[in-house]
Image (cartoon, rainbow, N blue to C red):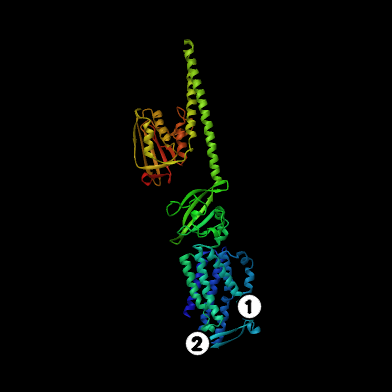
Amino acid sequence: MGALIFSGLISTLLAIKAYKAFNYRSLPFAKHFILIMLCMALWSVNYAFEIGFLDIEFKYLFAHLQYLGIAFAPVAWFLFAAEYSGVCRQFARKYEKLLFLFPCLAILLMLTNSIHGLYFEGFYLDASGGFPLLVLKHGPFFWFFYIYSFGLIFAGIFFFFRQFVHLTAPYGTQAAIALTAACVPVIGNILHIADIGPFEFFDPTPFSFAITGLILFWGTIQHEFLNIIPVARESVIESMNDGYIVVDFSNSIVDINKAALELAGKVRKEVMGENLNGIFGEGVEIFGDSPEGSFGREISLKSGLETRFFTVSVSPLMTRDDSEGKLVMIHDITEIHRYQEALKQANKKINLMSNITRHDILNQVNVLSGYTELISEMLPPDVKGDRRISKYLRNLNKGIETIHSQIIFTKDYQELGVVSPTWQSISNIAKEAAFAFSGQGLKFSIEDNGLDVYADPLLKKAFYNLFDNARNHGDHVSEIDVSSHIVGESVVIEVKDNGIGVSPVMKELIFEKSVGRNTGLGLFLVRGILSITGLEIHETGIEGEGARFEISVPPGNWRRASSQ
């Protein structure tokens, strides 16, 4: 009796766990699992009372109560297997209510058996084994319902067997757990119904529920039996446009979806058990010399006359803390690659046109500048000395210089973002930019703190413009300091000088285009260069004490040089 009570307790605990773990209203397999566990508990506990009582009437009463679990367990098992495995799911949902009609009819006939005798032809006590056991003589409807029940049970076993054969870990392991848990009580019940040996009068089925409960409990704790749903394999993975491949430790394929098979141009039988690096043809290696763990790379595959491009991501396939293989996902980026190539070609054409146009405009500007100089030299002295004429000539020369500076600026601005950002040493880039000011009376103090930033290759141009801005607008600037420090998860780069500083009203305006005493393009370009990788710049100095520009580098865009 203790084993039976223990079996009922385990079944009840599993039902409670399933109830707490899942939204059983939206996950049909969860409510069916709960029903199975409750049926097992009812069967076990009531059989314990049947054995425990000596009076035949009490035994017969608890035998009836057992059927509340016996009748519904096969249908609940079938529905659970269909939902959890994904096999025959639509059929199970469509005829779920109809399937429960037979258990309800069986219970009704059992309760009214004294009238018609269709379920039990009779019952008596057998004390030949030293302990009185209730013996039931089964009627015709019992055998009909028995065949019906075992048909559902074996169908559910077949569903999980199919999953066990076709799926890899962890789904295959879960299917094996369900198969083992189901087969134990089935074998016991067959031994009892077939009157084999000592099981002629003694039903081992409720006792076997203790073993089933322990198997399911172990599977739930160790292999997440109720946490990973194999139905995803059929309903999600097979419908994916991305390739899905699972390999074992030797890189042999153990699972693959339809999309990956189409990429390889093969059928499942051809690739199962084969090495992954060989299924896409020569020269295509998925793993190569990549390190263990997660990684990604790009590959290209020939499809007739067309070349297609893919990103491959590889990650360990884990169950709990143990690796059971690798998961390979293949995503088609052919269209993206084509757009990128088309964009590159368009940029090349635009840049070529811009270079030609800029060259032609500069030639015309030089011609205009030359003619202006000739006109100035050829003017009579009295005209040349006219203040208005002198003013016109100065403004004309200034306009020519402005046009020249703006055309030169377009070359720098055109190069923004053309080349991919790179990791650059703050101190090295600042020193390279400062070298251009050698011999101009500027003293540079550049801190070498071993920090790198991820920025556009024009970062040196940004530092150059900051230094040039200090020289041109700081009036008496003689010292420029460059330092950087970590603030929280970010890095702040400071460029300070000892000039006159910037007035509060101009702190943001100086970064606008065409604001300043000259072209007003230097700091506008600096902000544009920095913004490509999310760097921000602000002027935070005090007027009269020198300018101070702070460049904020966000997390992920800086590192220590030693990490290279």
Does 95 appear above or below 111? above
Q: Is residue 71 left or right of residue 540?
A: right
Under circle 1, the secondary element is helix
Q: Nearer the viewer, residue 498 or 377?
A: 377
Nearer the observer: mark 2 or 1; the answer is 1
User: Which residue lies under the disc numbered 1?
Assistant: 144
Residue 294 visible in the current orientation:
yes
Q: Position of residue 224 (x, y in %)?
A: 48, 64
Q: Position of residue 323 (x, y in %)?
A: 44, 60
Q: Position of residue 449 (x, y in %)?
A: 34, 42
The disc at residue 235 is none
Residue at 58 percent across and 66 percent down: it is 82
Q: Residues within 10 Å of mark 2 (few under 14, many from 20)?
A: few
Q: Seen from this angle, which residue lies furthest right?
A: 116
Asked which quadrant contains residue 112, the reply is bottom right
Q: Is residue 364 left or right of residue 453?
A: right
Does 231 appear above or below 306? below
Does 281 appear above or below 507? below
Q: Nearer the viewer, residue 294 or 71?
A: 294
Under circle 2, the secondary element is loop
